[in-house]
Image (spheres, rainbow, N blue to C red):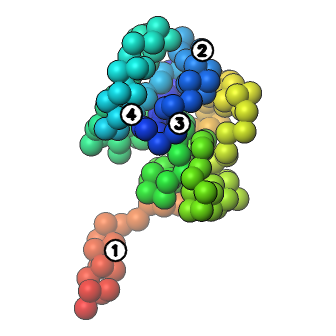
Amino acid sequence: MPTVLIMGGGWGLLKNDEVLERLSTWREHIQLIICCGSNEKARQRLLEGPAFRHPNVHVLGFTKEIDKLMDVADLLITKPGGITCTEGMAKGLPMLFYNPIPGQEEENIQYFTEHGYGQQITSLDMIDRWMEALLTRYPELASRRRTIQHRFQSNPLDCSQAIMQYLQ
């Protein structure tokens, strides 16, 4: 079953019921993992909503397991923060960006979209198109992800040596 990881906490994404409601309509066929971070109020609000009480919908609070969640996800929906987007890119995870803060997050969207790592959500129809693609073109999307991941593979020893040279 395809899996979508949704991150946004209290910074905008999880305040938009329209986007989350649209995503929830796919819950029979697509697993949704919603990370609310430390925003317990948003987590409780979602847990109380009937659309999010489903075996394929998982609403999480703060977790140190984002790395593992990205490994199992097939799509990341997030605000375009630098760290999250860079980690998603390194994992080859296609990304949909929502509600950028003017300035750096707008520049992040520009960079990641121009390089083919994601798209900005411009309509609810875009969400439907991505969910449909996860269901009908899954092998193609998985292959693309492996190709991107291969670009970013690095040898830990090389990384350690580069750091040591920098510190000298």
Mark count: 4
Residue position marked by numbered label 3 in the rendering: 13
Mark 3 or 1: the one toward you: 3
Q: CA distance from mark 3 to mark 1?
A: 37 Å
Q: CA distance from mark 3 to mark 4?
A: 10 Å
Inspect this view and state whether residue 16 appears. yes
Q: Secondary structure at mark 3?
A: helix
Q: Secondary structure at mark 4?
A: loop
Q: Secondary structure at mark 1?
A: helix
In this rendering, is residue 125 above or below 93? above
> Percent x, y for residue 68?
34, 40
Residue position marked by numbered label 4 in the rendering: 36
Determine the image quadrant of residue 112.
bottom right
Please tell me which of labels 3 and 1 falls first in the chain: 3
In front here: 1 or 70?
Answer: 70
In this picture, residue 134 sits left or right of residue 45: right
Residue position marked by numbered label 2 in the rendering: 25
- Residue type (three-letter) at the residue carrying disc 4: Cys
Screen quadrant of the C terminus: bottom left
Q: Residues within 10 Å of mark 4 (few under 14, many from 20)?
A: many
Mark 1 or 2: the one toward you: 2
Contact between labelled residues 4 and 2, with CB atoms less than 8 Å apart = no
Please tell me which of labels 2 and 4 falls first in the chain: 2
Residue position marked by numbered label 1 in the rendering: 158
